[in-house]
Amino acid sequence: MNKKEKPLYDARAKIFKSLAHPTRLWMVHQLADSERCVCEFVDELDVDFSTISKHLSVLKQAGIVEDDKRGKQVYYRLKVPCILKFMHCVEAVIESQAKEQARLIK
Amino acid sequence: MNKKEKPLYDARAKIFKSLAHPTRLWMVHQLADSERCVCEFVDELDVDFSTISKHLSVLKQAGIVEDDKRGKQVYYRLKVPCILKFMHCVEAVIESQAKEQARLIK
DNA sequence: TGCATATATGGCACAATAACCAAATGTTGT
DNA sequence: ACAACATTTGGTTATTGTGCCATATATGCA
């Protein structure tokens, strides 16, 4: 990796990092259908609301979601829906792994 | 997120985690063309070979790459090429971010 | 067998992340 | 202006990730 490439791979890694947490992935999944306010996540997740806010902030910083405030509430939505397509690939990886595990046990 | 969903999102997150490092992303990129032996990565990256070996191990554990030993050398290759398609989406995110930055500066 | 090469693994120091609590900010309704 | 609510931010601690060094393991060759 040369010096020119480094910032590019750093930027890419930042995006993967932002998705590298089960709670954030779940949030992205929820946002696939429609926008959600923070309060909905607070209801549906069993973690402190400050934690939820920080997770959303990570996704926002990475450019995955965008937000806007309407009244007292802040709504988040997916900014880049192509993320969702990748989930199929992720499933493929998981299945391929599962099969391999099964094969090793036999 | 209910209890049934949790393991699924953990598994997905593991895959994103494995890709959430510039060096590992670069490796995946190199493997897009063809398999590589560890020694090639050692030549091209400016980190200790033990570090490289560990990065590859993370990718292997996640099911992204597979390896086989031929003589003294261990060759790694992409197990799930669909990973590469996602990179386009990642680029889109980065570009959208860049544009936004530009807009904010104006 | 002994030696050089290629890779993996264990251990330690340091950096980054995550979760909670507490406090700050912004908004609506009284 | 004040109280109630929604969200963000700062601080602290626990956990995890990273990188280096030293060491172990495996292979090929003299």
Image (spheres, coloured by chain):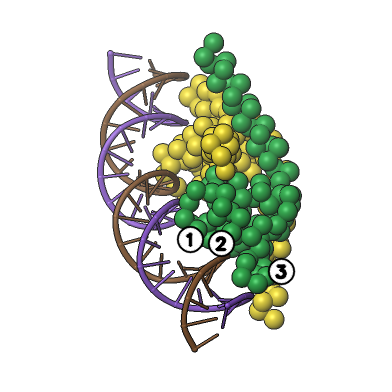
Chain colours: A yellow, B green, C brown, D purple
Cα–Cα span, label 2 and label 1 = 10 Å
Q: Which of B100 and D10 is in front in this view?
A: B100
Residue type, label 2: Ser
Residue underneath mark 2: B57
Callouts 3 and 1 in the same chain: no
Label 3 marks which chain's residue? Answer: A
Residue at the far top in the pictured view: B106
Q: Which of marks 3 and 1 is in front?
A: 1
Location of residue C26 (image quadrant): top left
Residue underneath mark 1: B50
B38 to A52, vertically: above or below: below
Give x and y (percent) for residue B67.
Answer: 66, 65
Give x and y (percent) for residue B47.
Answer: 48, 51
Residue type, label 1: Ser
Residue type, label 3: Lys
Q: Which residue is drawn at 50% across and 48% down?
A: B46
Residue B14 appears in the figure: no
Give x and y (percent) for residue A27.
Answer: 58, 42
Label 2 marks which chain's residue? Answer: B
Residue underneath mark 3: A99
